[in-house]
Image: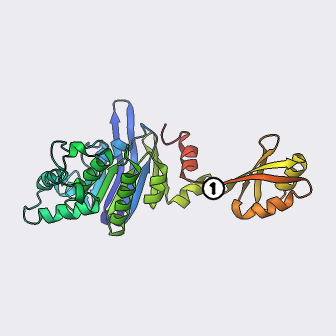
Amino acid sequence: MAAMTAALSCLGLGKRYGDLVAVDDVGLSIAGGQAYGLLGPNGAGKTTTISMLVGLLRPDAGTVLVGGVDLAREPLRAKARIGYVPQEIALYPELTGRENLRFFGRLFGLPRRGLAARIAEVLDLIGLTDRADGKLGAYSGGMKRRVNIGAALLHRPQVLILDEPTVGVDPQSRKAILDGLEHLVADGMALLYTSHYMEEVERVCDRVAIIDHGRIVADGTRRELVSLVGGADTVELVLDGDVGAAFEKLRAVEGVSEAARTGDTSVRLLADGGRYLLPSLITAVEGHATVTATQVVEPDLEATFLHLTGTTLRD
């Protein structure tokens, strides 16, 4: 029943190219007002999955439902509920920003009466009202991507699907894009988001799936995913004095689960609540050594991704 009422869901999605299995038994469900991140190394199956979810590619197996509408059985009705922002800019450089939006609004079948007002709303949302009548070819890469997103929003879709929407954009445009996406989710839109920037996914998405070799290997909230590799913080200490004796004291501190010498003067510890444990660690070595430098690294999605896929996100 949850899949029937989700803004976007799929079950058993699969795609093969000869002997190559590009997507294997993928399932996901996104509710209205939820931002769902899809992470994976290059070649993992992200873009193939998205292409099937938006109806650009026919799956070999599985079903896709958009607001309960079967994409295979009622493609036009299902696609009308989707806003899709592809990796590449899908706009006309010889037209102005406003003219591009008007063109795509007519393609969506929006009536002429009211279209100008809707375009004005979208331009305000993407922060380009003042530049709307300039030729798109003169826009920066970030501005073009904002218009790309605006075109996907004109028909008020139920779900917005974005395939790496901030590649190559300037920091100002990236902030504008992320701020706008958070606003859309807060207003109840469902969001499916892929990116090679882990910090964006951590900021925007409240649920994340990791795909590798065509299969979803993990799916959950950030906290749930991070717990897969353990919740302990890594504490790095640099010591001055009798490092050997200090090390024995450190490994006995309550809350330290693992300890290792990483150099002549450095120690690495695994501990729950590493930042809060620092005073106890510093006290433990008194009389043997002095702590001259500290660093606490909390577990994050990057660590989880590396653990599950054996590669970094940008590999």
Q: Residue at x 61, y 54 (%)?
A: 299
Left or right, 206 with respect to 9, comes to: right
Question: Most extreme residue toward the bottom, as rendered?
Answer: 187
Left or right, 128 with respect to 254, comes to: left
Q: How far across and down, in percent of the image, does residue 249 sit?
A: 87, 55
Q: Residue at x 37, y 59 (%)?
A: 29
Color style of the picture = rainbow
Q: Is residue 4 above or below residue 309?
A: below
Q: How many marks?
A: 1
Left or right, 240 with respect to 134, comes to: right
Q: Residue at x 71, y 65 (%)?
A: 276
- Which quadrant is the N terminus positioned in? bottom left
Which residue is identified by label 1?
298
Q: How far across and down, in percent of the image, does residue 200 sit?
A: 45, 53
Question: Most extreme residue toward the left, as rendered?
Answer: 112
Q: Is residue 255 above or below residue 92?
A: below
Q: Assess disc 1: are there few (<14), some (14-19) or many (≥20) residues with their C-alpha within 10 Å of its C-alpha.
A: some
Question: Quadrant of the rendered structure where residue 16 is?
Answer: top left
Question: Most extreme residue toward the top, as rendered?
Answer: 18
Question: Quadrant of the rendered structure where residue 82 is?
Answer: bottom left
Which residue is nearer to you in this view: 143 or 230? 143
Q: Amino acid at mark 1?
A: Glu
Q: How far across and down, in percent of the image, does residue 267 sit?
A: 78, 47
Q: How far across and down, in percent of the image, does residue 286 sit?
A: 88, 58
Q: Is residue 311 above or below residue 28?
A: above
| SS at badge 1 | loop
Which residue is nearer to you in this view: 149 or 60? 149
On the question of residue 28 being in view, the answer is: yes
